[in-house]
Amino acid sequence: MKNKIKKTQSKLGLAINFFVQLVIAGLIILPTFYGIHYAYNQPEASLYFGVEKIEYQGLIYLNQEKLDSLVLGSLSKNILRVDLDQLRSLVETESWVQEAKVRRKLPNRIIISITERQPVAVAAIDNELYVVDTEGVVLAPYGPHYHSINHPIIKGLRNVARENSQEDNLQRMQMYLRVLADLKDSSENYNQSISEIDVENPERVAVIPNGDPIYIYLGNNNFLTRYKTFLSQKDLYDRLKVQYGLIESVDVTYDNKIIFHTPQEQGKGVIAHPRDTQS
């Protein structure tokens, strides 16, 4: 009988202890939830959690005022109600932004860390010059700030307003970078002798030498070998220019011949064979 009483008292003690802990937890949790609810929903909360400052990290080319005009119009006054994912997505719509990370710093600051796209080339699009990154993303109109870009102009990128332009531009930019890498061999950088690279048709890439607006078609591979083949025939090219007055284009896409297209030949051209390239 005594054992039963002890067991009952023990269970009662446990129940009372659990109840006390539950009450204590409730006294802690309920005010917390109320505080969060108040901070989110009461107008007075903006006095304590109002967004007072936006800090940007990683800006080099991107203008802070431009970002402010993009962000501030859609930002909640209460920092706790700011949707960080939505704000990140909004910032990443800016062409210069490759990646953005957004976080709160209570009580009143938003910090936005930005990884910018890097301008690597100048593109001629619709008779205007723009700087673009390695993915062919148009960043800004070309100007004095970008004179350090020392690569041939890329032709053939599409206006961003056109359908599927970004997919096409990515493919064409990748081809352009392949040409740059191939024409810069261990002994000489042949890119310095080229003013433009046309990748409008990635299967039929053309380069245009400095000071001579002639299209030299290199195909889609072996760019260095094919360009050297043209250089080996430079004397013949110069003689044909004197003879015909104009060479419209040079086709070096074949392994066994070079075709110099002249107006008089109407597309048939003058053909030089590999043995001629060794002379």
Image (cartoon, grey):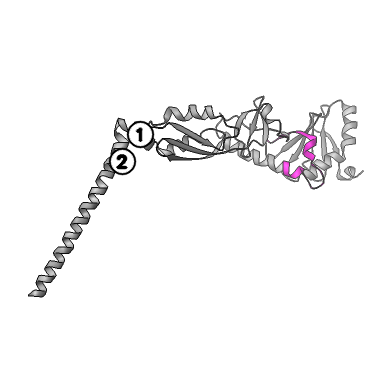
Query: Could you say which quadrant of the image residue 143 lies in?
Result: top right
Q: Which residues are magenta?
A: 180-200
**Residue at image x 19%, y 60%?**
17
Could you give the CA–CA distance between mark 2 and mark 1, rounded to whole angstroms?
Answer: 12 Å
**228 falls in the magenta region:** no
Residue 222 badge:
none
For this view, does 59 lie left or right of residue 151? Answer: left
The residue that mark 2 highlights is: 36
**184 falls in the magenta region:** yes
**Residue at image x 12%, y 68%?**
8
Q: Is residue 131 visible?
A: yes
Image quarter of the N terminus: bottom left
For this view, does 159 lie left or right of residue 192? Answer: left
Is 269 or 95 nearer to us in this picture?
Answer: 95
Residue 164 in percent (x, y) is at: 56, 35
Amino acid type for the residue under numbered disc 1: Tyr
**Residue at image x 72%, y 38%?**
205
Q: Is residue 200 visible?
A: no
**Residue at image x 69%, y 39%?**
176
Is 251 or 127 nearer to us in this picture?
Answer: 127
For this view, does 273 lie left or right of residue 19? Answer: right
The residue that mark 1 highlights is: 48
Residue 201 in percent (x, y) is at: 67, 36
Secondary structure category for the residue under label 2 = helix
Residue 216 in percent (x, y) is at: 78, 35
Answer above or below: position of 55 versus 256. Answer: above
